[in-house]
Amino acid sequence: MQSGRIGEHGFLADGRSAALVDRAGSVNWWCPLRFDGPSVFGRLLDDDAGHWSIHPDDEFTSKRSYLDDALVLRTVFTTRGGSVALTDALALEPGARGHEIGLRSPRVLSRVIEGLSGEVPVRLDYRPRFEYGRVTAYLTGHDGHIDATAGACRLSLRGDVPLVGARGDATATFTVRAGDTYGFTLGHAPTYDSDPPALPDAEQVVANAVAGWRSWADLHRDQYRGLYRHEVRHSAIILQGMTYRPSGAIVAAATTSLPEQLGGDRNYDYRYVWVRDFSFTLQSLWRAACPDEANRQFAWVARAMGDIGDEQVPIMYGVQGERDLTEHRLGHLSGYADSGPVLVGNDAWKQRQSDVLGEILDAAWLMRHYLDPMAPDVHHLLRALAEQAARHWERPDAGMWEARDAERHYVSSKLQCWTALDRAVRFGSRLGCRADVARWAAVRDEIREAILTRGWHERLGTFTGAFDSDHLDASVLMMPLVDFLPADDPRMRSTMSVIERELSHDGLLRRWDGDPAGFVICSFWLVSCLALAGEVDRADQLFRQLTARVNDLGLYAEQIDQVTGEHLGNFPQAFSHIGLINAAGWLTEAAERRAAAGQPRQPVPAGTGRTEGAR
């Protein structure tokens, strides 16, 4: 049995790492040390890279859901002889609640199968493969559990049924009758300088994980009171699951090298933290979580950047602030659906991407009330970034889509340099003297004129992706979102119309002509722009189309095929869920403005019900 499609996976998290489980009950991805650590189950990228499956040993159908407000997955298998429920959870520290969840998680994956009706033959296959499938461990059984140790990694598996091991694999077959419950706990620990893996009771792990996740959700239940509350709350929980809690950093995705196009070569490792996403992430946390979560994000980026001078600003980091993310290929893995290469690391860390300057200053402006008084290190960082924008805005760069062929004068990069200086001017004397502010304002206005002149294509009637270019790019939809131009400005209305006509299909918007699939956050940017332009009904219709594109667990990948609807790219994708939250916020504000103006408001449901869980 091969790994399921990208969109058929569920997402588990413990504040340090993530596991992906498909509809057939197979754990096909788990990097227990941390999000960007080596996998022990990697079948997502190669059938021989390890997995752990539990499913009926007979023909079956499956239906699954998250338990309400918890990243705990329940899959119900139905066979001709009966039905069973499999519940999967990554363990949280016992008793951890609220903002404490994920700080000291024990690196444990627990699975509980219970009989619901009749009797069902069940098969368990345990096939750990360390270091992305490079290493097959020896399995030894003692004291009621099976140990797998090789190199720097060891796993211990304990279960309520005996397992038979041979050459790195273990199996079990057993019958589950109505009322039966069987638990399995898998613990990880480094081979050296560590205690043995923890092996807590599986049912207790599940119960504690449910209580922990729900305690976090309860803290933020009333934070967002706008439209589509269920979808926003669910996306906020997904973002929390993608947070490396010891540092507060949010990874872009839980996976590496899932292809943007089957058979293509645009495969990248997204298990890192992009400064580019920073402002949008803070906006989404501000709307859907609470200032505490946003504060943690800002504290993380300030620590990661350190003392910035005139050197090139790093655009991405490891989850603990590491800078060197040098990329290398895992040639022994065939890749998802034979779509290699499989990469670890991401050489984009070396690139110049000028938009990061605006991302950080925009985030600081959003949090300005929490930065008063401004700490000396934050003051130095923001001032240094403003100075870089003023001095270097005319340089070409790799752009927000991280082009690897050549640097260009991307409009989105110039736009964010404008944003950096605009926010610096708004800070005024809190950031610089009168002469500084005047100089920043002059350069800001110079950038604005350049964008309006060289970024606008008169014949096409649209802003384009780069200066003096005729190539369309959805990134220019950020202009109204950073207050560069009103969404109802004739140039923006024309741009929105051209981009939607040329790049959109059935609600999914590609980044550029030739992009293999719709890019989810770009589609939500269009929702936001329509809402800001006063086209609330159109924006709402598009929002509903997009929320219908999630998988059955309410998860988005990075991209979605415009024809087949298949999820593509790394999964789940934080940027996609950030886009949903922010678009719902813009849509809510637009609807409120329309209501205040006395215009009729169309009824909009609080949730579509696609991701409602079970108790």
Image (cartoon, grey):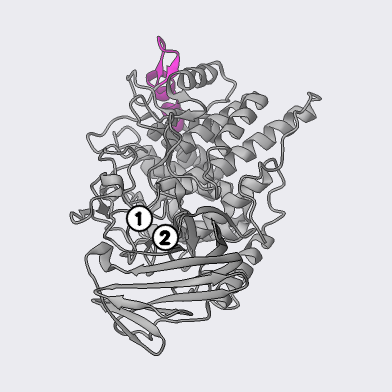
Q: Does the magenta portion include 110? A: no
Q: Secondary structure at mark 2?
A: strand
Q: Residue furthest right?
A: 598
Dot 1 crowding, Cα within 10 Å, few <14, some 14–19, many 20+: few
Q: Can you name the residue that lies furthest to the left here?
A: 331
Q: Residue at x 44, y 55 (%)?
A: 22
Residue 501 at x, y = what percent?
47, 18
Q: Which mark is residue 1?
A: 1
Q: Amino acid at mark 2?
A: Ser
Mark 2 surroundings: few (<14), some (14-19) or many (≥20) residues within 10 A: many
**From mark 1 to mark 2, how far is it between C-alphas?**
9 Å
Q: Which residue is mark 2?
A: 26
Can you tell which of label 1 and label 2 is closer to the viewer?
1
Above or below 27: residue 609: above
Residue at position x 42%, y 52% from top?
A: 253
Image coordinates of residue 25 in percent, x first then y, are: 46, 60
Q: Amino acid at mark 1?
A: Met
- Depth check: give the residue in front, 554 or 74: 74
Tag 1 secondary structure: loop
The quarter holding residue 247 reads bottom left
Q: Earlier in the sequence, mark 1 or mark 2?
A: 1
| Rendered view: 14 above or below 464 | below
Q: Is residue 450 above or below residue 284?
A: above
In the rendering, at what x and y percent does residue 180 appear? 58, 74
Contact between marks 1 and 2 (CB within 8 A): the answer is yes
Is 293 situated left or right of 199 in this image?
A: right
